[in-house]
Image: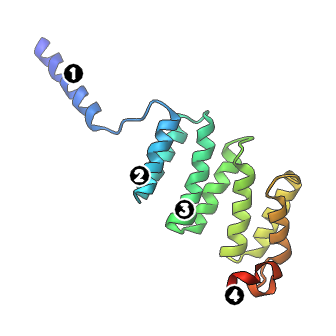
Amino acid sequence: MKVKYSYILIAIFLFQACGDKIPKTALELFNRAEKHRQAKEIELAIKDLHLLIEHFNTDLMASKSQYVIGDIYMNDIRDFEKAVEAYRKVTTDFENAAEIPHARFMIGYIYSNILSEYEKARLEYQSFLEKYPDHELSPSVKFELEWMGKDINEIDALKHITS
C-alpha cells in the first residue's frame, strides 16, 4: 500500500514540475509577460496576461494587463478588430480602472485612423469627452474630432511630418 501512495506522490510532483507555474504575484506574472513580448513570444505574452486576469482579477494589474493585450493586438499583431475588442473589455470588465479613458481613446483612434470608420470613431470620442472632459487626452480627442478623415497635408500642425 505504501508503494502505491509513493507512486502517486511522485506522479503529482512530476506533473507540478512539468506544468506552467503561476507566479505568486500579479507583478511577477506581468513581468514574465513583458519578457515574452520583448522576446517576440507574443502568444506566450498574451497567455500570461490572460492568466494574470484570471488568477489576480481584483489586482490593479488585471486592468493594466487587459489594456496591454489591446496594445499587443494593435502594435505587435496588427489585428485591429481584436485590439478594439481587448480595449473594450477594459471599459466593461474593470469598473473605475485608470486605463479606461486610455482604452476609450484607443478605440476611437483605431476606428478613425486605421479602420476609417468615422461614425464609430465620432461616437467613441464624443462619449469620451462627456465622461472625461478634463482628462489629459481631451485635447487629443478634440483634435481628432476636428480633423477626422482629413489628409495629413490638410492639417497645418502636421504638415511638417510629410515634408
Asked if disc 4 and disc 3 are in contact, CB closer than 8 Å, the reply is no
Q: How far across and how far down the image is residue 54, in percent?
A: 52, 39
The residue wearing badge 1 is 9
Q: Identify the residue position indicated by label 4 in the image.
A: 163
Chain-order first, disc 2 or disc 4: 2
The answer to which of marks 3 and 1 sits earlier in the sequence is 1
For label 3, the residue is 73
Please give the name of the residue rendered at 59% of the width and 40% of the height, measured from the top-left corner.
Answer: 61
C-alpha span from label 1 to label 2? 30 Å
Q: Which one is nearer the viewer's eye here, 152 or 100?
A: 152
Q: At 50% from the left edge and 46% from the top edge, which residue is drawn?
A: 49
Whole-angstrom CA distance, mark 2 to mark 3, is 13 Å
Question: How many C-alpha atoms fall within 10 Å of the one at disc 4: few (<14), some, or many (≥20)?
Answer: few
Examine the rendering and report whether any part of residue 82 can be seen: yes
Side (left or right) of 50 relative to 17 = right
Q: Is residue 81 left or right of residue 34?
A: right
Q: Which amino acid is tagged 3?
A: Tyr
Q: Position of residue 144 (x, y in %)?
A: 80, 71
Task: Find numbered disc 2 in the image and state the secondary structure of the residue it sits on.
Answer: helix
Alpha carbon distance from label 4 to label 3 = 30 Å
> Amino acid type of disc 4?
Ser
Q: Which x, y percent locates residue 58?
A: 61, 33
User: Mark 2 sits on what residue?
Assistant: 44
Q: Nearer the viewer, mark 1 or mark 2?
A: 2
